[in-house]
């Protein structure tokens, strides 16, 4: 069991890197997608990601119960794409406890026998968001990334398609 956190900005190569790492870990691979189809542009993005993965991953679509999806996955490698989309889903779903969701996610990742590769976006390097929701999201994303980073065996920061090992 190990946890690998892959972070960076938008279109920095996070998913490509995570998929490559998962392919090196064995033939049983699970890809947990947290994104939901909300419009035609998102549908096209999801189709592009599916094509990049090809048929060598079992895909699980889970926008909210990420801890449960990780816990039930049996694989050599599990790729979760991505934590910040999942966080957004939690925050926009009435009655969801974000902190409890994060703890459930962490316990599931730590408890799974697979290598769990968690993809996340760094959202704290830009300007302070104008809205309360935006600032809350940025703060929760920072807390989520720190919490997962504290249990990760490896942390990789993606810059221009290149992975920099942080931990």
Image (tube, helix red, strand yellow):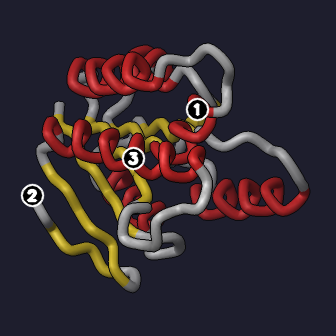
Q: Is residue 88 above or below residue 64?
A: below
* CA gap, disc 1 and disc 2: 29 Å
Residue ID at (51%, 70%): 10
Q: Quadrant of the C terminus?
A: bottom left
Residue ID at (17%, 31%): 1
Q: Is residue 69 left or right of residue 89?
A: left
Q: Estimate the x, y position of residue 163 in percent, counting from the top left.
A: 26, 73
| Residue 60 visible in the snapshot | no
Residue ID at (73%, 61%): 45
* CA gap, disc 3 and disc 1: 12 Å
Foreground tag (1 vs 2): 1
- Tell me the tag on residue 91: 1
* CA gap, disc 3 and disc 2: 22 Å
| Along the viewing direction, whichever of 154 and 124 lies nearer the viewer | 124
Q: Estimate the x, y position of residue 61 in percent, counting from the top left.
A: 64, 32
Q: Estimate the x, y position of residue 3 in percent, counting from the top left.
A: 22, 40
Residue ID at (20%, 74%): 164
Q: Secondary structure at mark 1?
A: helix
Which residue matches tag 3?
Answer: 139
Q: Are marks 3 and 2 in contact (CB under 8 Å)?
A: no
| Along the viewing direction, whichever of 140 and 35 lies nearer the viewer | 140
Foreground tag (3 vs 2): 3
Q: Is residue 107 left or right of residue 40?
A: left
Q: Secondary structure at mark 2?
A: loop
Label 3 or label 2, whichever comes before in sequence order: 3
Q: Residues within 10 Å of mark 2 (few under 14, many from 20)?
A: few
């Amino acid at each position: 069991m190990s946890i690998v956190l892959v972070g960076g900005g938008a279109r920095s190569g996070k998913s490509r890197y995570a998929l490559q790492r998962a392919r090196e870990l064995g033939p049983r691979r699970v890809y947990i997608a947290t994104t939901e189809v909300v419009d035609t542009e998102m549908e096209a993005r999801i189709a592009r990601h599916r094509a990049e993965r090809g048929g060598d991953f079992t895909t699980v679509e889970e926008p909210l119960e990420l801890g449960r999806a990780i816990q039930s996955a049996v694989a050599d490698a599990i790729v979760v794409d991505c934590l910040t989309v999942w966080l957004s889903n939690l925050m926009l779903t009435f009655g969801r406890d974000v902190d409890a969701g994060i703890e459930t996610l962490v316990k599931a990742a730590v408890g799974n026998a697979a290598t769990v590769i968690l993809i996340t976006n760094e959202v704290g390097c830009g300007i302070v968001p104008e809205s309360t929701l935006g600032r809350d999201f940025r703060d929760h994303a920072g807390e989520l990334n720190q919490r997962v980073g504290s249990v990760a065996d490896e942390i990789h920061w993606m810059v221009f398609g290149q992975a920099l090992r942080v931990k």
